[in-house]
Amino acid sequence: MIGNRIKRARKAAGMSLRALADEVGVSHTSLNKFEHGTLTPSSAQLIMLGRALGVRTEYLLRPERTEVELEEVEYRKHPKTPRKLLDRITATVLDQAERWMELLDLYPTPPIKQMVVPSSVSPSITRYEQLEEVADGLRLEWGLGENPIPDLIDTLESRGLLVIPVEVPEGVRFDGLAGQVGERHIIVVSKSIPGDRQRLTLAHELAHRLLAGHIAENLNEETACTRLAGALLLPRQAVCDHLGNHRNALEWRELYLLKHEFGVSMAAALFRAEQSGVITESLKKRLFREFYTRGWGMKEPGDPVNPEHSLLFEHLVYRALSEDFIGQSKAAELLGISASQFQENRSLTEIGVDATAHQ
């Protein structure tokens, strides 16, 4: 175990056996034995190895596979979602989380950062209106401006959240959940829902991670998370820029265009119009009555927003393979595909293969 980690860290550092041996002050033969597991380095040698390779000693001592637990779980689901289905989804998530942890352990230094709660999140949220400022501050700190977020999954992963898409049986309402595995924050989202609902789910679960312990008792946490999610996806200033500062009427086509520009539902865009002060609450209620009369509560008109996919896990598997941290069989195992399928994907003999098929 220690030998494999020394070898991986050495290769990641671009050092030869002899160069590392000279740096640590051991013989080339001894270092070779360390890497092959026939000789165990002393505590002092481990410290020297860690310093020379730029990794923590804990990395060299960490078990190859660590059993994981899903903690601090927050579900975003329909009230009638069967408990058995939730248990199955949790088991699937744990399996993927274990593979995530194993994959991250391959790297001498973490290939992705840890999520940090931005300073724009107030320590005490006592009014729902404060969440507009939180969203604006979050966009500012993350360099998102006021433009649409083209790939929310990529944005979250770049900030240290692990996103795990899962298959959900047709007809079953489950949108997603947020949780924690060790020090890593994860968001689980259904592959089976439209892109606008998927994006709202991702933003909602992010809000749970960010607002934990910050919401006053007089506020409803779900309402607060939904408000922050909407403000993040469709900022107040963008609403005013597109619709104007005050309107006495709205065209449905305006909401449809906002849907496809910002990746939110027409219903969410209508909520944001009222929350941004563009329309009154009474106009919002009147428009929603018409909205549901038209049957759009079940299915909105026009083309749906395409769902998003995560490619980070697969990318890091192939990076580990290229860095010689793992072989082909381990790479296939981590991706959950056969050796033959992996070889075809790797060699691009199936050019049309969906890059997201194994997520």
Image: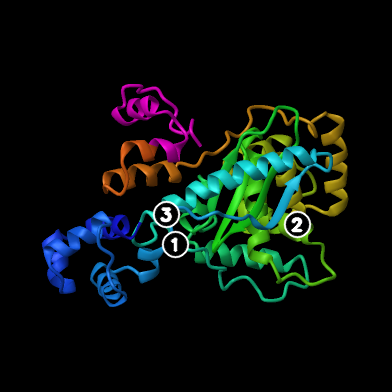
What residue appears at the point 79 percent right and 41 percent down from the top-left corner? 83
* Residue 202 image point, x, y percent: 62, 49
Question: What is the number of the mark on residue 113?
Answer: 1
| Residue at the spot of label 3 | 64
Q: Earlier in the sequence, mark 1 or mark 3?
A: 3
Question: How many callouts does the rendering have?
Answer: 3
Residue occupied by mark 2: 275
Determine the image quadrant of residue 109.
bottom left
Boundaries of the magenta span: 332-359
Quarter holding residue 53? bottom left
Q: Nearer the viewer, residue 311 or 268?
A: 311
Three-letter code, disc 2: Gln
For marks 2 and 1, the one nearer the N-term is 1
Residue 46 marker: none
Q: CA distance from mark 2 to mark 1?
A: 34 Å
Residue kind at label 1, given as amino acid type: Lys
Find residue 288 and report its horizontal and vertical position in percent.
84, 41
| Residue 182 visible in the current orientation | yes
